[in-house]
Image (cartoon, helix red, strand yellow):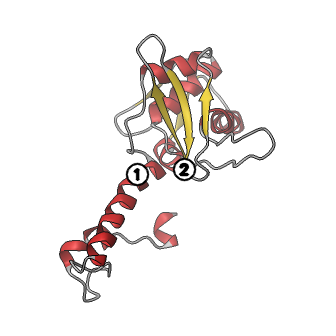
Amino acid sequence: MQKSVLVNISDVCRAIGRPPAHLVTFLGQQLGTSSKIDKDGKAFVGGAFTEGNIQELIFVFLRQYVRCHRGQAGRCNSIETECISEGTKKNRQLFLVCKSCGARTIIPNEERFAKFMLAHPPSASTFGHARGDDLVTNISAQADAAAAGEGSLAPKGAGGNSDHSDSWEDDWSDAERE
């Protein structure tokens, strides 16, 4: 049996802020074949598919389950969204919440993949840009402490109080993000 291997699925999912299991399951359902992720982070889809076929389905996934669908007239189109589920067990509903414009869009529950997402919701703030909330909260706490005269927002080694600048150790330059 032939298999298509997606070696960079973890990088793609980190960039779009969704768990790899969601994207791989979507691809398997759309292609009508089996799909799985191994322990090394490689994804396998049963069958021989071209890069173009897989890429087009990833774009469909982005349009339907990642990109902001704000309003009829104007679209935000940001991929900085979070997928959340609300409601009781029988009346659960999926929403896309945009971090750029604040829009909240319902994802219809009729589709098979939407049912999978309801059964396997992503854990909060663990993938890609979704992790940014933790950093923003940490920076806000540091700013409050600095305003109260308890510390500094200066990066480590810049003369600030190192107790309040732990999150500034990472290199956030453009080269590191790519």
Secondary structure of the residue carrying tag 2 is loop
Q: Which residue is drawn at 31% across and 70% down?
A: 144
Image height of 154 relative to 1, above or below: below
Sequence-wise, the earlier of marks 1 and 2 is 2
- Does 50 appear above or below 175? above
Mark 2 burial class by Cα count in 10 Å: few <14, some 14-19, many 20+: some
Q: In percent of the image, x 61 and y 28: which residue is there?
A: 106
Q: Which residue lies furthest to the right in this view?
A: 73
The location of residue 97, given as percent across then percent down, is 55, 40
Figure quadrant of the N terminus: top right
Q: Name the residue under label 1.
A: 131
**Crowdedness of circle 1 by 10 Å Cα count: few (<14), some, many (20+)?**
some
Residue at the far left: name it: 163
> Is residue 121 visible in this depiction of the protein?
yes
Tell me which amino acid carries mark 1: Arg
Question: Which residue is label 2 attached to?
Answer: 99
Mark in front: 1 vs 2: 2
Query: How far across and down, in percent of the image, does residue 155 sit?
Result: 32, 80
Q: Which of 60 and 146 is in front in this view?
A: 146
Q: Which residue lies furthest to the top in this view?
A: 90
Asked whether 150 or 112 is in front, the reply is 150
- Residue 37 in picture, x, y percent from top left: 42, 31
- Given residues 24 and 73, the one toward you in this image is 73
For the residue labelled by badge 1, is the local secondary structure a helix, a strand or a loop? Answer: helix
